[in-house]
Amino acid sequence: MKLNRLKALIGCCLLFSIRSFAAPVDSLHLSDVLQSHMVIQQNQPFKVWGEAKPGRKVVIHADWLTVPTEVYADANGNFMGIIPVPKAEKGNFTAHRIDVTAGDEQVELSNLLIGDVWICSGQSNMQFSVKEMTGAEQVISGADQSHIRLLNVALNFSETPLENFKGNWQVCSPESVSGFSAVGYSFGKKLSDNLNIPIGLIFTGIGASSVQAYIPKADLAADTMLNRVYLQPYLADPKSKEPVDGGFSFEKVMRPYLLYNAMIHPLVNLSIKGVVWYQGEANHLERESYVRATQTMINSWRRDFSQDQLPFYYVQIAPFFHDREDPALAFDAYFREAQEKIADLNNTYMVSTMDVGDAKDLHPKSKKPVGERLAAVALNRAYNQLDVVYQGPLVDNVECAGRKAYVSFKAETLGAGLQTNDGQPPRFFYVAGADRVFYPAEARIDGNRIVVESRKVADIAAVRYAFFNYPVTNLENKEGFPALPFRTDTWEEKMK
């Protein structure tokens, strides 16, 4: 098969060479994700896979093992060996090496660390770089963190699942961190500081992308709702029959399954610790289908990575006014409400950005708190550090009594108690009577509850908190985690 034809078929430039795993090869190559400077997931099997001459013996030797692993390339030249990896030790940043040989050919992977690997994925607020974030200069100047390793997976699209991608593992430094995900790096830095083990971060995503873009085609087809909402409209579009290249377009990043094929599938043989995800703006007018799609995506990734309990922590979309300063507009609030339901799936959790958003900026620059909140979730839930607070106040009960309402929160979410981050009364409480007309309400902290009152509603029937498009909130617990938006009514959403 000619090299140019392979380029056209695969549509991306590869690290070692451009090739197809379906065709026999004559030389030794490793998967693109297996590189020097990477972090190898601790305490899980590590797959070493690639291509060699069909039938040739491939010898894999890791310097932490006394006996090499031997496998043979199959008729198509594909091979895979699986080697054990020890548990990471705190403060141990020993550089390791793996040598892979086939006949007289050899590939050496050096400067490897054993620690934890996390995938960071989603759209623009996850892609948003360190150099753009609040406090960028200080973050970058302090980024000589040789025990953190970074991998950016280059943008690509594919109609069929790929084995290859473009991207290089890099040692974290002021130069390499500058263009990396700000949320991802803030997450990894907090883990590194707390755990004192190597951390590997893989960013694979792109701005403006939709959730359906990250779901395998077969999983979309297998679900009646997802097939109807996402897959069939695309397959009926003439664009689905056209060749797809790797260049960006706002339309292309919304197409189903293409990003999964090109940017997730090449990674699935890796053992990883978990996933952090920040996406939703591209689907913000959806409700039930988005919940179903995201849960389907999580389950499909868990299956394909062969880790059925893979931790998956995600970010609720930030406040944004959509160029309309009208507190009656609540379509994003209903979407945030839908996002909460994703966490009905086991081993998932959602963090809020309601207090660190910017109502007039879809891409708020305060990214450090977002990453650190994801890290707090991971420390508590994935690393069993049960003393780490990771939740913000979550409503438990609302008692309405005439002009007043009393809001109580789940005890485990209160931390050391309620406060506001600016010393002012809690903002963005609204109340309505039986007429379903909402009015702003006064609110005050009373111990571990909020007392809400309005002179305009004599008999409160419903209470809403931060339930419109763009409230940047001030209510939190004393550990700095924001109270989550809520509503007590079940009144149908009115689209405007």
Image (cartoon, rainbow, N blue to C red):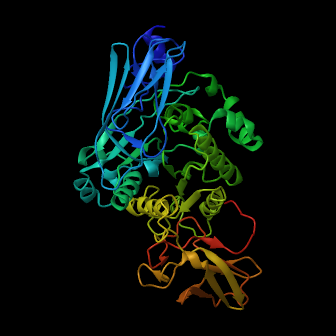
Q: In this view, does 416 lie to the left or right of 94?
A: right
Residue 155 against residue 173 in the figure, above or below = above
- Residue 152: percent from the left, percent from the top? 39, 39
On the image, which quarter does residue 458 sit in?
A: bottom right
- Residue 387: percent from the left, percent from the top? 47, 72
Residue 13 seen anywhere in this rendered image of the structure: no
Residue 405 against residue 107 in the figure, above or below = below
Residue 289 against residue 45 in the figure, above or below = below
Specify the quadrant that holds the C terminus: bottom right
Residue 194 against residue 410 in the figure, above or below = above
Question: In the orientation shown, which residue stands out farthest toward the top?
Answer: 1
On the image, which quarter does residue 307 sit in?
A: top right
- Residue at 29% from the left image edge and 61% from the top image edge: 135
Residue 293 seen anywhere in this rendered image of the structure: yes
Question: In the orientation shown, which residue stands out farthest toward the front?
Answer: 66
- Residue 182: percent from the left, percent from the top? 37, 53
On the image, which quarter does residue 454 sit in?
A: bottom right
Nearer the observer, 273 or 467: 273
| Count of all numbered marks drawn on residues in the image | 0
- Residue at 37% from the left image edge and 26% from the top image edge: 15
- Residue 359: percent from the left, percent from the top? 47, 64
Nearer the observer, 322 or 317: 317
- Residue at 43% from the left image edge and 41% from the top image edge: 85
Nearer the observer, 434 or 390: 390
- Residue at 40% from the left image edge and 32% from the top image edge: 34
Q: Is residue 216 left or right of residue 183?
A: right
